[in-house]
Image (cartoon, rainbow, N blue to C red):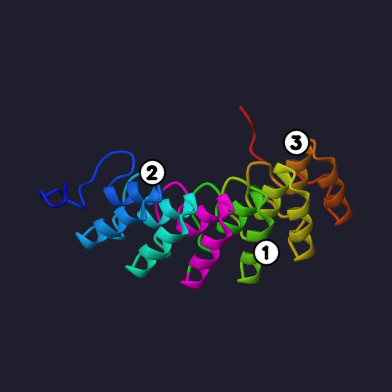
């Protein structure tokens, strides 16, 4: 009704930035379809999630993701809380959306925002299936960036022992430096994850390694 009365489908403002992102975030596929039909810009930037594709991906709305991609959404668009759609979906463990984005050409090693990359996002949340999928698609296991510095440190800090084991078995550098805690061993030790600490030490972690962000 509003669109029929001349409402601007691309009007900017508010938490979501635009109507398309708002509908996408909440999984309203019929509304998304209607907005696109009325000329909504599928790649419009703004709002909390940066764009509609990232919003739908973060919430795991696979039908909306498919609809947006079919309408030309940029699968590697950068912006928003997660940096890109793949990192958003990976962080929340939405394996079906992750697979869809990768099949449409998402850059598995794209950098950006808090988690640095999709692998670190999935590792930090303990989403083993997504971690495996990203590695199978060529994710750089030792990529640096983000709060935790690398995927191993992210998984270690949260005590996700199965993900830690998977990363180590796939060649993660047990002594990689970077991130808030400096290295994986320091991250796991601070949180008291004894099983992870044991695993890291068994793989040759340097018990005297220095690093990390000094707290004021």
Q: Secondary structure at mark 3?
A: helix
Q: Quadrant of the C terminus?
A: top right
Tally of marks: 3
First of labels 2, 3 by sequence position: 2
The percent position of residue 96, horizontal first and vertical second, equals 55, 62
Q: Residues within 10 Å of mark 1 (few under 14, many from 20)?
A: some
Question: In the rendering, which numbered label is found on residue 191?
Answer: 3
Query: What is the crowding at mark 3: few (fewer than 14 residues within 10 Å), some, or many (at least 20)?
Result: few
**In-image side of 22 versus 132 (left or right):** left
Q: Can you say whether 177 is above or below 13 in the image?
A: below
Give the number of the mark in front: 3 or 1.
1
| Rendered residue at 65%/71% (across/down) | 136
Rounded to the nearest angstrom, the CA distance separating label 2 from label 3 is: 30 Å
Does residue 68 appear to the left or right of 3 in the view shown?
A: right
Residue 40 sits in which quadrant?
bottom left
For the point 34% across and 45% down, the residue is: 47
Residue 161 part of the magenta segment: no
Residue identified by numbered label 1: 132
Of residues 184 and 80, the one nearer the viewer is 80
Q: Are marks 1 and 2 in contact (CB under 8 Å)?
A: no
**Vertical relation: 164 (above or below) 139:** above
Tell me the element at label 2: loop
Q: Is residue 107 visible?
A: no
**Tag 3 and tag 1, C-beta contact below 8 Å:** no
Determine the main secondary structure of the stretch shown in magenta: helix
Say which residue label 2 marks.
48
Q: Point out the stretch of residues depicted in magenta.
A: 78-105
SS assignment at label 1: helix
Dot label at residue 75: none
């Amino acid at each position: 009704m509003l669109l029929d009365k001349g409402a601007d489908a691309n009007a900017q403002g508010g938490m979501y930035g635009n109507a398309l992102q708002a509908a996408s975030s909440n999984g309203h596929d019929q509304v998304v379809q209607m907005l696109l039909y009325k000329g909504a810009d599928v790649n419009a930037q703004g709002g909390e999630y940066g764009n509609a594709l990232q919003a739908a991906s973060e919430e795991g709305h696979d039908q909306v993701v498919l609809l947006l991609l079919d309408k030309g959404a940029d699968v590697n668009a950068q912006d928003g809380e997660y940096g890109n759609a793949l990192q958003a979906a990976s962080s929340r463990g939405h394996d079906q959306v992750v697979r869809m984005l990768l099949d449409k050409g998402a850059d598995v090693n794209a950098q950006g925002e808090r988690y640095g990359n999709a692998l670190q996002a999935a590792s930090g949340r303990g989403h083993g299936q997504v971690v495996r999928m990203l590695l199978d698609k060529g994710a750089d296991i030792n990529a640096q960036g983000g709060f935790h510095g690398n995927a191993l440190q992210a998984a270690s800090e949260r005590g996700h022992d199965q993900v830690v084991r998977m990363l180590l078995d796939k060649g993660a550098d047990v002594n990689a430096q970077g991130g808030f805690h400096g290295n994986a061993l320091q991250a796991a030790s601070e949180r008291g994850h004894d099983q992870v600490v044991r695993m890291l030490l068994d793989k040759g972690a340097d018990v005297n390694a220095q690093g990390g962000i000094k707290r004021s």
